[in-house]
């Protein structure tokens, strides 16, 4: 099973009990409908796929959109609905990604170089032509700016730009473990397209202090 199918399966698995807690009847049937709708959305928006690397991301955005559209038919307020989806989606891979980031920083002689190299490699290898990144690098700072984002393009095309933030928030899983006092690396992301910005700047800076 490919990583996007595993992610999708886990998303639906975690969504199930959250739907049940809302007191909605027929949660299993609703999830089957959401899954079928996600498959339909994949086909509907396949024209947005720029290359093979983009296709898995279409499956994830389609799953989020399908769940949002289905749950929007329930009495749940829209603000709570987006929060619920963001919370469920953001929980996937949280423990393992935080552990990976902590280990990467802790066991590297140069945490700044380690985390920036990993970030650049991931951007270039895992996101494909539906994204555009600009890089500015010095010995003391590294800025990766996303100037085109498939997530944003997809949700704008689908008429649900408020859902882009679900994917922005997922990044907190690797952002939160980066501690300036502990690793000598400061991270800042002041805005994203999903939060109303025109681009997404990821800024890493060396700091003078690092715990030993």
Image (cartoon, rainbow, N blue to C red):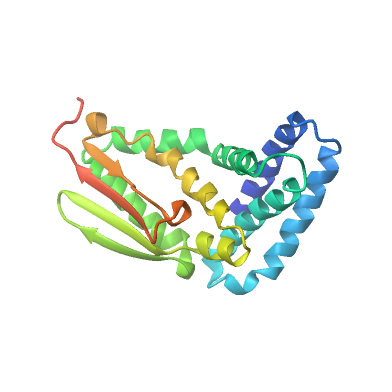
Question: Can the viewer see residue 56 in this picture?
Answer: yes
User: For the image shown, how many numbered marks are present on the structure?
Assistant: 0
Judge by depth and name the residue closer to the eye, 200 or 35. Answer: 200
Identify the image quadrant of residue 115. Answer: top left
Give the quarter of the image for residue 17: top right
Q: Is residue 152 left or right of residue 148?
A: right
Towards the viewer: 173 or 160: 160
Residue located 27% across and 55% down the image: 143
Rendered position, 49 above or below 56? below
Residue 77: x percent and y percent? 67, 40
Residue 143 in the image: above or below residue 27: below
Q: Position of residue 7 (x, y in %)?
A: 62, 47
Spot occupied by residue 14 in the image (x, y as percentages of width and height): 67, 36
Question: Observer-nearest residue: 190 or 128?
Answer: 190
142 to the left or right of 83 = left
Residue 116 in percent (x, y) is at 29, 50
Give the residue drawn at x 59%, y 67%.
Answer: 157
The residue lying toward the viewer, choosing from 196 and 56, is: 196
Is residue 1 visible in the rendered image? The answer is no
Q: Residue at x 62, y 74 (%)?
A: 47
């Amino acid at each position: 099973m490919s990583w996007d199918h595993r992610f999708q399966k886990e998303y639906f698995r975690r969504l199930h009990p959250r739907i049940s807690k809302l007191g909605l009847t027929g949660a299993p049937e609703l999830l089957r409908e959401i899954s079928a709708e996600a498959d339909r959305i994949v086909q509907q928006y396949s024209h947005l796929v720029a290359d093979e690397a983009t296709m898995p991301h279409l499956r994830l955005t389609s799953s989020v959109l399908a769940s949002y559209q289905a749950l929007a038919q329930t009495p749940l307020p829209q603000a709570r609905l987006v929060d619920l989806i963001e919370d469920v989606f953001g929980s996937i891979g949280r423990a393992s990604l935080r552990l990976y980031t902590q280990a990467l920083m802790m066991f590297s002689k140069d945490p700044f170089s380690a985390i920036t190299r990993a970030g650049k490699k991931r951007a270039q290898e895992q996101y494909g032509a539906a994204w555009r990144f600009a890089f500015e690098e010095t010995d003391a700072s590294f800025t990766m700016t996303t100037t085109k984002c498939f997530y944003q393009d997809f949700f704008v095309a689908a008429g649900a730009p408020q859902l882009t933030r679900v994917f922005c928030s997922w990044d907190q899983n690797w952002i939160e473990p980066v501690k300036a006092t502990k690793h000598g690396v400061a991270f800042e992301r002041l805005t994203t397209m999903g939060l109303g910005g025109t681009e997404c700047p990821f800024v890493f800076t060396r700091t003078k202090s690092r715990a030993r």
